Image: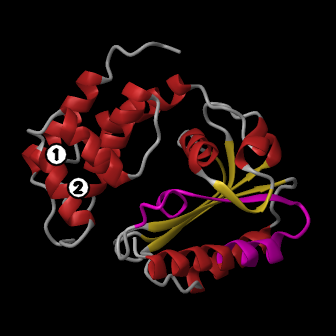
Amino acid sequence: MAHDEEVAVLAAAERLAHSAADIIGPPLRSAILHGSVATGHFVPGSSDIDLLLITDNRLVDAEIDALETVVRRFDLGEATGVDLHVVTTGVACAPTRAPVLELHIGRYDRSSVGIEIERRTQAPDLPAELSMARADGYALIGSGPGEVIAPIPPRWLRERGRHWLTTWQSLTDDAEDAAFMVLTACRIWRFGIEGVHCAKTQAAEWALERNPSLTAVRQAMRQYGAEPAAPPDEDGVAQVLDTVLRETADLPND
């Protein structure tokens, strides 16, 4: 990522965090930037801004509505979306397999989904979000990730990752989400083998070093980057999913 692009996307993330802080006020314990922006692997025109808010109090309806308005109206700049998660301090400090999520607002401008909103629901994918924020995120406001997010057992993440790999086996013809499935499968694979969280591009490079025959990974990288209208082929997606499921089948239950 070029220096000017890095400065611009970081400034956008900070504006988003401070807008959220104005809404939540003193109960906001931490606003943690994570994902590709935090790790320096942001891809202009392809990557989202990932922001985790940890608050001492449950959100009230007026705060939820105000946060939704901010995300909908937010100037994304070179980002293609926002993934905003809000959890309480109690959840972050003592997570379970399906902790309660206060709020998720996903804005995906390059997707048919558009806006996705979840309010006060159990979220089995939240432990992965917390784990990634703890590993690679940093605080734009308040306490650092290690101070407010407890470690997540790796087996929870491996099991949830395999759940998605199995689910996606029936969706290999989904051209719109093909690159997402392939690149996320690469991330699940690397975490399963090495216990390392990484960006989509890093995971793809790691996967190709491990198995250069996975042509769908190269295709997914092209769709993720410069060729959004050129998805991986269906058989190639299936090959990636089958490979990752096989390679993560007998990992230690730590």
Number of numbered labels in the structure image? 2
Q: Is residue 163 visible?
A: no
Q: Secondary structure at mark 2?
A: helix
Mark drawn on residue 237: 1
Task: Identify whether 93 is placed above or below 57.
Answer: above
> How far from the left and from the top, in percent, is residue 87?
72, 51
Find the magenta span and give its range.
16-42
Q: Crowding near pointer 2: few (<14 within 10 Å), some, many (20+)?
A: many
The reply to whether callout 2 and callout 1 are in contact (CB within 8 Å) is: yes
Q: Is residue 10 left or right of residue 245?
A: right
- Residue located 37% across and 68% down the image: 43
Query: Which amino acid type corresponds to the residue marked 2 in the rendered image?
Result: Ala
The residue indicated by pointer 2 is 178
Q: Is residue 31 left or right of residue 41?
A: right
Q: Quadrant of the N terminus?
A: bottom left
Task: Identify whether 194 is placed above or below 63.
Answer: above
> How far from the left and from the top, in percent, is residue 108?
43, 71
For marks 2 and 1, the one nearer the N-term is 2
> How far from the left and from the top, in percent, is residue 99?
67, 39
Mark 2 and mark 1: Cα distance apart in space: 7 Å
- Viewer-closest of 207 and 50: 207
